[in-house]
Amino acid sequence: MTIQIPRGTQDILPGQVEAWQWIEEKTRDICQKYQYKEIRTPIFEQTELFQRGVGESTDIVQKEMYTFKDRGDRSLTLRPEGTAPVVRSFVENKLYGQPNQPVKLYYVGPMFRYERPQAGRYRQFVQFGVEALGSQDPAIDAEVIALAMEVYKSLGLKRLKVVINSLGDPTSRKAHREALIQHFKPKINEFCLDCQNRLERNPLRILDCKKDRDHELIKNAPSILTFLNEESTQYFEKVKDYLQLLQIDFEVDATLVRGLDYYNHTAFEIMSEAEGFGAITTLCGGGRYNGLVEQFGGPSAPGIGFALSMERLLAAMKAEGIELPINEHLDCYIVALGEEAKDYSVALLQQLRQAGFSAERDYISRKLKAQFKAAERMQAAYTAILGEDELKAGTITVKKMENGEQTVLSLNNFIEAFTELCK
């Protein structure tokens, strides 16, 4: 019986993984500039964390979580998103007591959702995300959006669109909620069962429905922007002002609500407008979540963050024809002929590596020509040729693969001479 990879997952193979590593390193460099520090949370958490944090009425909690009982009969869930675990850690480890505030964190890691697999969307996927906790300043909303845009632009993406909205404070949301209920209630039986269940619990989720998104009532639903109180309006205007100061173009979309219950005030998405990218254009989404820290037992500490899919980022780069400057070079490939030379090359190979060089040799008894072919495939800068004659003479012949130029070096000081040659 052949065992195959689970549906909705992928193997990231050598030749592919280098792109992931390069992008991850780029995101870490950008986070360092913005003073965001890495945090690593468990891959599984108590199920209640996501039920309370993400929201009982969301598709994630209702349909998409991988939940199981452990041997102690505790309900655990593979994390479907990164914000709730980070906030849980922020509270549990009392990061709100640190002298440097706000606390600015980032994460990179796998998430799990039981969704229908499609291009760029998997059941196990990798997210890069940031969270800034402890500031109510609208300038940090703009900073978070700017950081996300810098990630994309630093990787060469140009066909980008930023869409923003305000979900308002609790007072504004309550007024909007009542208006939505009155708007949808007369014809709620025309909507899917999920939307019917959401009407009283969280009517805002109806606007995010994938099945009924073309329904006329969704298209002309009351806009949250008309229900913003003065405080929420001023906050949103300030965020827009800061984005303009940062020269970030954006569009306001009153239907943008995001898929998680914890959002309030600023919500945003970054989309790809690249030709051929696909029907689902969202690359990144995030927003403000004031109140979530208190919900997990912490003090008043407003927060904002975003998460982006690494898979969709790679797909967008492919759609724009972007190739990363990944150098998979090999400094030296040792070509050994004869048993004595093969034995000698084992220690020589290790000496090269300990001196800081990327080095390799043959391990499957190839002939001379095949060893040179292997060196070419591995893009070796040099080959070091060692046979019985070279061993007797105490020398080794080094060939520069770019132009075929050969140099004879002494085995006694090979590492020093090779280092000089490489300069």
Image (cartoon, rainbow, N blue to C red):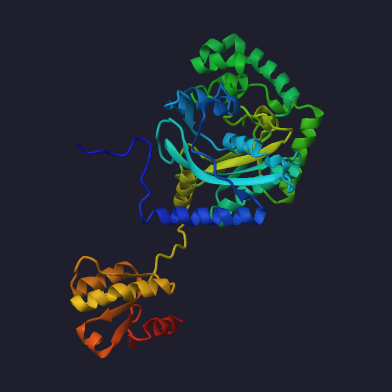
For the question of whether residue 176 can be seen, the reply is yes
Residue 28 x %, y %? 57, 54
Query: Can I make out residue 121 in this image?
Result: no
Q: Residue at x 39, y 70 (%)?
A: 358
Residue furthest front in the image: 72
Q: Where is residue 8 in the image (x, y as percent from the top left)?
A: 38, 36
The furthest residue to the right: 230
Residue 342 pos. (x, y %): 23, 74
Q: Horizontal placement of 139 versus 397: left or right?
A: right
Relative depth, front residue between 275 and 329: 329
The one of 225 and 84 positioned closer to us in this rendering? 84
Q: Nearer the viewer, residue 240 or 309?
A: 309
157 relative to 111, above or below: below
Above or below: residue 97 compared with residue 408: above
Percent coordinates x, y for residue 356 in the rendering = 44, 72
Most distant residue in the bottom direction: 393
Place residue 134 in its image quadrant: top right
Residue at 31%, 79% in the rendered image: 384
User: Which is more toward the observer, 271 or 351?
Assistant: 351
Left or right of 239, for residue 107: left
